[in-house]
């Protein structure tokens, strides 16, 4: 999806695709756009091919159990999750913002969407890829996507998808999840033989579950697990999911806050926190009236200290980094270290994702990115958005 031959670069475009080196921002409000034209003038004559050129692939269906959940639904009143091949959703009534998320109603992702937009209409999707597609195809206004959680760390698949799609990050939501053990009405904890949930939720409830001595089984999302148990009336199977999922699928809550069972009495356990991103087709106009964060992705050439140099552009300007993540470049995973060797010395080539605490409306952020672009062959701004300062 290269933009060769154009001098206008939108927020989601890679700077490496801009042959003129002059950068302006394609935004609706032209007055505000003036703030960002100062990105222009940095020449970029390095890579001309975007690292994102590959077409988004249809995601593999890794979890057959979970797919089965959606097929076996007997609770037909619930919205059917959207998949790429199934785009028959009713048009938005224009009053409510419609948010796509992965999972079924009652999942933590839906809870995050409702936290960000309490009056929104939520659109369940089968796969993360579909969550992006729903917005790209105007079936949803925004998407809510988990990006990291306090127990498992980064959700790598979503870092990859952020680059492969052209949506913009326009917000973040931090959700403290209360993981509950659910079961069919009338069932006691001792009767459970198996517990189903999302792998992260199971991992976070590990101590609690091993005390119960039950087998655990991964499924795609917590609410999907609740629906499966409810619709199949599984009497010896428990679920780790939200209280809201219990309500929606008619299950009982046998235990609350099962993620906290390992904490010592004096330890103030903040719980199981997931950070979600809010994505939209259009970028948010950066301001300086509240704390903003900017997310970028870039590549670096080989050489001693290049990552150190890249990080220094922020340190020099007193810009705090909140996150750094690296992912292998799919199209170019291996690199020959130098010409003199026999070709054996190869290692992975990486994309670096950084979140920093500054607004693109601030000169220090613009100058840091201008500096970074001097030696980063590829650089893309994923979004500039208000920071979530509380959970
Ligand atoms: O299973 C859910 O309830 C989800 O919303 C999915 C998901 C995820 O994909 O990471 C989101 C938040 C929690 O970290 C656990 C699972």
Image (tube, helix red, strand yellow):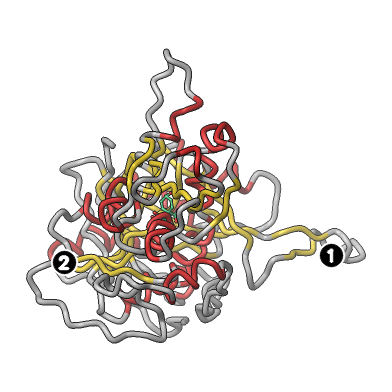
Query: 15 or 107: which is nearer to us?
Result: 107
N-term-proximal mark, 1 vs 2: 2
Which residue in the protein does label 2 denote? Answer: 97
User: Which x, y percent locates residue 302?
Assistant: 69, 56
- Residue 308: quadrant of the picture: top right
User: Which x, y percent locates residue 104?
Assistant: 35, 64
For this orientation, the residue located farthest to the top is: 266
Query: 188 or 77: which is nearer to us?
Result: 188
Q: Is mark 1 within 8 Å of ligand 1?
A: no
| Residue at x 46% of width, y 36% of height | 315
Residue 185 versus residue 204 in the image, above or below: below
User: Which x, y percent locates residue 207?
Assistant: 55, 32
Q: Which circle, 1 or 2, is nearer the viewer?
A: 2
Q: Please say if the residues under marks 1 and 2 sit with CB atoms less than 8 Å apart.
A: no
Gap between marks 1 and 2 measured at Cα: 55 Å
| Residue at x 28% of width, y 37% of height | 391
Residue 324 versus residue 43 in the image, above or below: above
| Residue at x 47% of width, y 67% of height | 161
Which residue in the protein does label 1 denote? Answer: 339
């Amino acid at each position: 999806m290269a933009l060769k031959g154009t001098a206008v670069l939108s927020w989601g475009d890679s700077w490496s695709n801009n042959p003129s080196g002059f950068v302006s921002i394609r935004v609706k409000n032209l007055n505000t756009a003036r703030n960002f034209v100062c990105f222009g003038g940095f020449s970029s004559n390095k890579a001309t091919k975007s690292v994102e050129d590959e077409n988004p692939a249809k995601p593999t269906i890794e979890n057959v159990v979970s797919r089965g959940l959606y097929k076996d639904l007997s609770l037909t009143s619930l919205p059917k999750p959207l998949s790429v091949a199934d785009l028959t959703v009713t048009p938005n009534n224009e009053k409510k913002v419609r948010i796509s998320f992965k999972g079924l109603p009652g999942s933590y992702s839906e809870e995050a969407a409702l936290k960000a937009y309490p009056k929104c209409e939520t659109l369940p999707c089968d796969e993360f890829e579909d969550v992006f597609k729903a917005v790209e195809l105007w079936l949803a206004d925004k998407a809510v996507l988990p990006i990291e959680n306090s127990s498992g760390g980064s959700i790598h698949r979503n870092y990859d998808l952020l680059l492969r799609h052209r949506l913009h990050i326009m917000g973040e939501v931090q959700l403290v999840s209360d993981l509950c053990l659910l079961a069919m009405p009338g069932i006691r904890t001792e009767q459970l033989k198996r517990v189903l949930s999302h792998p992260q939720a199971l991992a976070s409830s590990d101590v609690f579950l091993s005390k119960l001595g039950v087998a655990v089984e991964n499924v795609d999302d917590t609410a999907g697990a609740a629906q499966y148990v409810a619709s199949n009336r599984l009497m010896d199977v428990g679920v780790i999911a939200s209280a809201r999922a219990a309500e929606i699928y008619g299950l009982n809550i046998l235990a609350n806050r099962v993620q906290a069972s390992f904490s010592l009495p004096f330890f103030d356990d903040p719980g199981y926190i997931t950070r979600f991103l809010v994505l939209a087709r259009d970028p948010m106009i950066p301001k300086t009236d509240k704390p903003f964060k900017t997310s970028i992705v870039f590549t670096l050439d080989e050489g001693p200290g290049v990552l150190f140099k890249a990080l220094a552009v922020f340190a020099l300007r007193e810009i705090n980094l909140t996150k750094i993540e690296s992912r292998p470049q799919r199209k170019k995973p291996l690199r020959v270290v130098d010409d003199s060797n026999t070709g054996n010395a190869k290692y992975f080539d990486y994309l670096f994702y950084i979140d920093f605490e500054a607004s693109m409306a601030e000169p220090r952020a613009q100058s840091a990115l201008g500096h970074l672009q001097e030696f980063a062959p590829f650089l893309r701004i994923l979004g500039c958005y208000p920071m979530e300062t509380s959970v």
